[in-house]
Amino acid sequence: MPRDTLAELADEALVVLYANGDPDAARLLAKRLLPRVMGYAGRLLSDRAEAEDVAQEAMLRLWRVAPEWRQGEAKVSTWVYRVVSNLCTDRLRARQRRRAEALDDVAEPEDGKASVVAGLIEADRMAALDAALATLPERQREAVVLRHIEGLANPEIAEILQIGVEAVESLTARGKRALAAALSGQRAALGYEEAE
Amino acid sequence: MEDLDDLFATARASAMQPSDVLMARVLADAAAAQARPVAQTVAPVRLGFWAGLAALFGGGGVLAGVGSAALAGLVLGFVQPVGLMNLTDVLAGTTVDTLELMPGVDALLAEE
């Protein structure tokens, strides 16, 4: 199938095409999903190497499930987010079991186009956010990241976390409050005092 | 909370991006999974009358052979070639002039 036509197709149709042997479907799916998967795993794990492993594993599971994929059952992105959530939960629990220090595992944010000083401030802010996120219970953390960073709607988050929409609202509200409390002592690190 | 929303926006902008190496790994996985032999489920094909008959005899060629043999037998039975008659006489040892297939019926016919 021509690439222009493929680009207009929904993820679900691309999965079916991939299962039928279309060579370009996988490339397009990976291009669409991998950045989201990587961003979400990276924010939950705060570790690039681990996030890459999770992202690769989640995509591998998608490739494997493709032949049995039934259209209309779930959105592909929702399914992949759910897989990433579960994989990250496993890794975070394993990390806790090993008693690794989550705060030391914070990854270096990538260099942006900002100046070196601004870049440092931004890195500090992201490190503070990651540290604060790490203090939240895992479901709250997932809900907050999906809602406020990944920008998903509550019904989709409910499907990913396999809970009700009201539970999502409760989790995000409590998570946001807890996050604000955790960050309130770090205003200097976030660079707001300089701005005021 | 405004600070928090600002922080979320920064987080969105600075999300970890997949490296080219990761993309290559993912696509290699995709190619490998796609190349893996998948059990093909082929719907059983409904055979027509002749195809079904041919399948019963073990294929169209066999059915043609059986049909040809049956036709040849029928022709030989009707035509009764001289050469074949001589051969059957030799094999049988006697000459059969008449053959009453239903001897009981003659008596009934004669009475009428």
Image (spheres, rainbow, N blue to C red):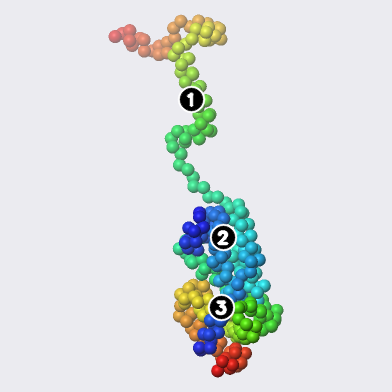
Amino acid type, residue under disc 1 in the picture: Gly
Q: Position of residue A128 (x, y in %)?
A: 62, 86
SS category of the residue bearing label 3 = helix
Q: Position of residue A90 (x, y in %)?
A: 63, 74
Tag 1 and tag 3 share a subunit: yes
Instruction: Name the residue nearer the viewer: B99 or A84.
Output: A84
Can residue B39 be seen here? The reply is yes
Going 61% across and 54% down the picture, which residue do you hit?
Answer: B35
Amino acid type, residue under disc 2 in the picture: Ala
Provide the chain ID for the residue under circle 3. B
Q: Which mark is residue B13?
A: 3
Q: Which residue is mark 2?
A: A26
Amino acid type, residue under disc 3 in the picture: Ala
Q: How many marks?
A: 3
Q: Residues within 10 Å of mark 2 (few under 14, many from 20)?
A: many
Tag 2 and tag 3 share a subunit: no
Q: Position of residue A96 (x, y in %)?
A: 66, 80
Q: Which residue is mark 1?
A: B67
Tag 1 and tag 2 share a subunit: no
Residues tagged 1 and 3 counted as in contact (Cβ below 8 A): no
Provide the chain ID for the residue under circle 1. B
* A83 to the left or right of B112: right
Residues tagged 1 and 2 counted as in contact (Cβ below 8 A): no
Q: Earlier in the sequence, mark 1 or mark 3?
A: 3
Can residue A123 be seen here? The reply is no
Circle 1 or circle 3, nearest the eye: 3
Mark 2 to mark 3 CA distance (whole Å): 26 Å
Instruction: Name the residue nearer the viewer: B24 or A172.
Output: B24
